Image (cartoon, grey):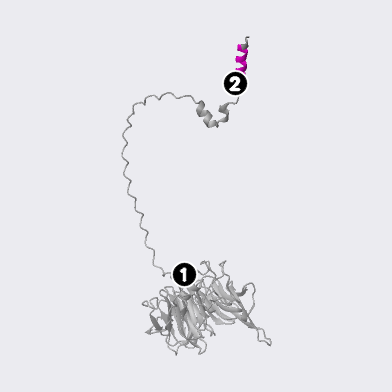
Amino acid sequence: MTRTSLLFVVASVVACTATNPERERPASEANVAAAPVEAPPAPEPAPVEAPPVAAPAPTPAPTPAPTPEAAPPEEPTPEPAPGDATGSTGEAPATDSDGGSTGEPSGTPSPAALVAVAITATDHTATWRDVATLPTATKGGFFPFATGILAGADPTFYSTDAGGALVPVEVDAPPGPVSGHWPDEAWCFHRQSMNDRAVTTRVRLLRLRSGRRWVPQELDGEQWRFSEDVGPTRKSWRVGYLAKVRYSLVRVASNGLEDPNLDYRGDLRDIAESKAGDLFTLSSDGDAYVQIACADRACVDAHATPLPTGGWEWVASIPRQKHSLSLTLREPEIDRLTHLLHYETGGWKLEALADGERLVALWPTRDGGLWAQTRGALYHRDPAGAWRKVGLPAGVEPTGPVFAAMTSDMSELWLIGVRGGAQVVLATPAKAQEPG
């Protein structure tokens, strides 16, 4: 090999082992640089004409939904209060140690005080039918249940059988005032003296079982409670019983319903509940107020309705249909029992009998009316609010403080009394406004 050829080979080897600039480039640049040159594009083929597109079919008109049949008329549902009774507004109500509202206003205008309307009743002659003549004189008259028949005194009692006939029954004498529906939801409030120097009393609730026995129920975990620890107690017309134990409202035999969480003005004096579960309170901060259930102060200020001046108490309570409620009021200082308080369509209404009367018991009717008994007379209020003074049967002297009762199906009002020396029970249609 010539010297010239050798030098050429050495130069070629050196050139091949030198740094390759393509390896220093990013891969993308290297690929682009190494990509072959594209051939000129081929001429575009002639466009092929697409078949004509059919016009879209018109959208059919929607078929109107069938109009539902009109539901039968029902009792109007009262307008709910702002903020429910469980505190769902998210703010804790301002309360005092008793659970009621503090005295600080919220700026909401308060409702006007209720004004009692005098009851003007038209005289009404009822048609009475004989139900039974009892073999022996029955003391005590009827027990004041909202519905259901129980008459007599220990040891002789009468009630109705499956066919509606009045028959003797074996039942333990209730040890205190009764309320509810006989016999399925019958309750008794028992107060007992401890016979000690402090004159301590204790109380408990009992419920009728098996149509005969009065069985104690627990009041917030205990059967007996000292009377000073128990506030208002009231039959709930929804289910079970309501009671205030110390500073808490509790339910008894309520089938798992939660205890109420309510706000009200001042101190709680009483509580009631409709068949639909509407809650109502009577409270006092010097004046007396009635209101629907509230969970905050704004609701209390908007709905706490003052009663006329006086220290009012609730006495008898009855449900009327699903949402309405009626109660008798008592003024303890003068022991006057002439006023009736209703919560019904339109809100609260207050009515008063003449001062010579004294309300004893109330009963509901199926159509939303009610019956009321005074010491010596019967009154009927129809669903429109019209009152009738119903004449007692001729020649019958009523028996017992409560001489009337409403049947379980609310079809008739019964009366017990003495006629011609015999103990008799008579009945008249519950809807007194209808022709006999």
Left or right, 266 with reference to 51? right
What amino acid is at disc 1?
Pro
Q: Nearer the viewer, residue 281 or 297?
A: 297
Residue matched to label 2? 15
Q: Quadrant of the C terminus?
A: bottom left
**Which residue lies most toward the right here?**
197
The quadrant in which residue 118 appears is bottom left
Q: Position of residue 396 (x, y in %)?
A: 45, 87
What are the residue bounds of the magenta stretch? 4-14
Left or right, 116 with reference to 85? left
**Number of disc labels:** 2
What amino acid is at disc 2?
Ala
- Judge the density around disc 2: few (<14), some (14-19), many (≥20) Cα neighbours within 10 Å: few
The quadrant in which residue 199 appears is bottom right
Q: Nearer the viewer, residue 407 or 366?
A: 366
Residue matched to label 1? 82
At horizontal 51% and vertical 79% (from top left) the residue drawn is 282
- Is 120 in the magenta? no
- Judge the density around disc 1: few (<14), some (14-19), many (≥20) Cα neighbours within 10 Å: some
At horizontal 45% and vertical 88% (from top left) the residue drawn is 357
Q: Secondary structure at mark 2?
A: helix
Q: Nearer the viewer, residue 202 or 179?
A: 202
At horizontal 53% and vertical 77% (from top left) the residue drawn is 102
Q: Secondary structure at mark 1?
A: loop
Q: Position of residue 411 (x, y in %)?
A: 44, 74
